[in-house]
Image: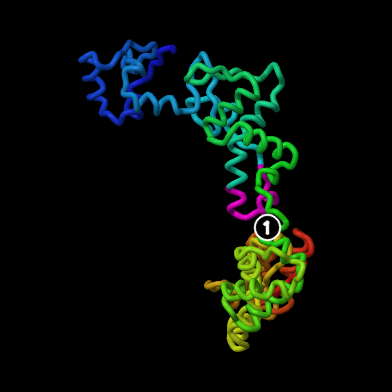
């Protein structure tokens, strides 16, 4: 393999040695070195050190860097680096509405995958003549999409096939294609869906008789033949447990803990699982008074130049947590809600539900 020469600063970064210790090893012949072509501001020539003379751990650390930068090759960088080429320095643009459709976990997953395939997207967007040739520190030339995918697989650790799948989904569906799709029947039992009598039996035992899930399952095993004479194989315990755990919490509290607990904990019942919503599904409005006094030169019904603590009426989208409409007043009312709502609808359209505080 071709010998690589590095500066003392790179040696220090790889080994953690002090500069004086590096120079002493060079004087004693334990580090191979040579004069560099670059010259310091003082006019003295710098030294370059042979990578092969460093400890194995330092060499491996160097070889794990993305690509060797230098005149003989072009460096591949996913993020800007003043010492490397910026051919692949930026990710494809992702708009705000695209991100709002997914949870924080899903966005993190999609961005990580987009970062992995970004060089493939950029490489393909170039014409055949303008596609550069890369060379890794191991001497492997990267001239095609397949070789680039193999290199990226080594860097990001999925298989090349997985990278190609992400790349194909991104070309087909865009940013949304990088998010794992949830199966429509996830958490649902085909057996229970096909046997309503068994579902009713489970709900009666669990909600009516208030048995534990384990006792409900034992009762099902005992009475299954009478419920479904043609059924020879019962559902699994995990399927029964999953079905009963999906009972709406208000119904569960009312049935198993009583009406008083239901009133204290569920009335009024407000949906707080934001990730199950979509933008513009539910808007919430409320008032809040600023902790500051101002001189009135705007609000009607209040003397000019009178001291006022203004009120803010805001409307927020429950899914994205974005404030979509605002209105200030000296005294909040239904009129300020209407004003804030008019602003929100003009910018974002009409929601499905509006909750007024």
In percent of width and height, residue 85 lies at: 54, 24
Q: Provide the residue span drawn in magenta.
A: 94-108
Q: Residue at position x 57%, y 30% from top? A: 152
Picture quadrant of residue 146 = top right
Q: Please tell me which residue is depicted at 26% across the width and 22% down the height of the picture.
A: 22
Q: Left of 190 or right of it: where is 38? A: left
Q: Is 96 part of what is drawn in magenta?
A: yes
Residue 82: image x %, image y %? 49, 28
* Quarter of the C terminus within the rendering: bottom right
Q: Nearer the viewer, residue 208 or 312?
A: 208
* Closest to the observer, 79 or 243: 243
Q: Within the image, what quadrant is residue 86 found in?
A: top right
x, y percent for residue 314: 66, 69
Relative to 327, does residue 18 appear above or below in the rendering? Answer: above
As displayed, is residue 180 above or below residue 15?
A: below
Give the residue at mark 1.
186
Magenta stretch prevailing secondary structure? helix
Q: SS class of the residue under badge 1?
A: loop
Q: Classify 266 as above or below 345.
A: below
Q: Quadrant of the N terminus?
A: top left
Residue under the point 74% across and 74% down: 227
């Amino acid at each position: 393999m071709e010998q690589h020469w590095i500066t003392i600063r790179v040696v220090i970064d790889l080994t953690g040695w002090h500069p004086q210790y590096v120079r002493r090893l060079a004087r004693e012949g334990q580090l191979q070195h040579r004069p560099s072509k670059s010259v310091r501001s003082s006019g003295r020539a710098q030294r370059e050190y042979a990578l092969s003379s460093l400890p194995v751990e330092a060499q491996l650390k160097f070889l794990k860097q993305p690509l060797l930068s230098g005149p003989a090759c072009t460096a591949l960088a996913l993020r800007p680096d003043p010492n490397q080429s910026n051919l692949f320095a930026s990710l494809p643009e992702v708009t705000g509405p695209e991100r709002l459709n997914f949870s924080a976990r899903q966005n993190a997953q999609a961005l990580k995958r987009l970062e992995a395939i970004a060089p493939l997207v950029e490489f393909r967007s170039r014409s055949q003549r303008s596609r550069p040739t890369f060379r890794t520190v191991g001497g492997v030339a990267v001239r095609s999409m397949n070789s680039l995918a193999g290199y990226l697989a080594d860097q990001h650790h999925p298989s090349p096939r997985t990278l190609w799948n992400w790349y194909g989904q991104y070309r087909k569906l865009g940013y949304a294609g990088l998010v794992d799709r949830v199966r429509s029947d996830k958490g649902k039992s085909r057996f229970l869906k096909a046997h309503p009598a068994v579902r009713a039996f489970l709900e009666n035992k669990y909600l009516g008789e208030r048995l534990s899930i384990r006792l409900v399952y034992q009762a099902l095993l005992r009475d299954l033949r009478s419920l479904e004479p043609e059924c020879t194989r019962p559902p699994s315990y995990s399927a029964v447990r999953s079905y009963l755990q999906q009972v709406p919490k208000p119904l569960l509290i009312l049935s198993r803990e009583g009406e008083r607990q239901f009133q204290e904990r569920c009335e009024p019942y407000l949906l707080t699982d934001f990730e199950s919503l979509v933008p513009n599904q539910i808007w919430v409005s409320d008032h809040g008074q600023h902790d500051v006094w101002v001189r009135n030169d705007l609000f009607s019904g209040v003397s000019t130049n009178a001291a006022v603590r203004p009120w803010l009426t805001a409307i927020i989208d429950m899914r994205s947590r974005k404030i979509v409409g605002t209105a200030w007043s000296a005294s909040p009312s239904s009129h300020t809600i209407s004003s804030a709502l008019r602003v929100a609808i003009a910018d974002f359209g009409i929601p499905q539900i509006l909750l007024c505080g």
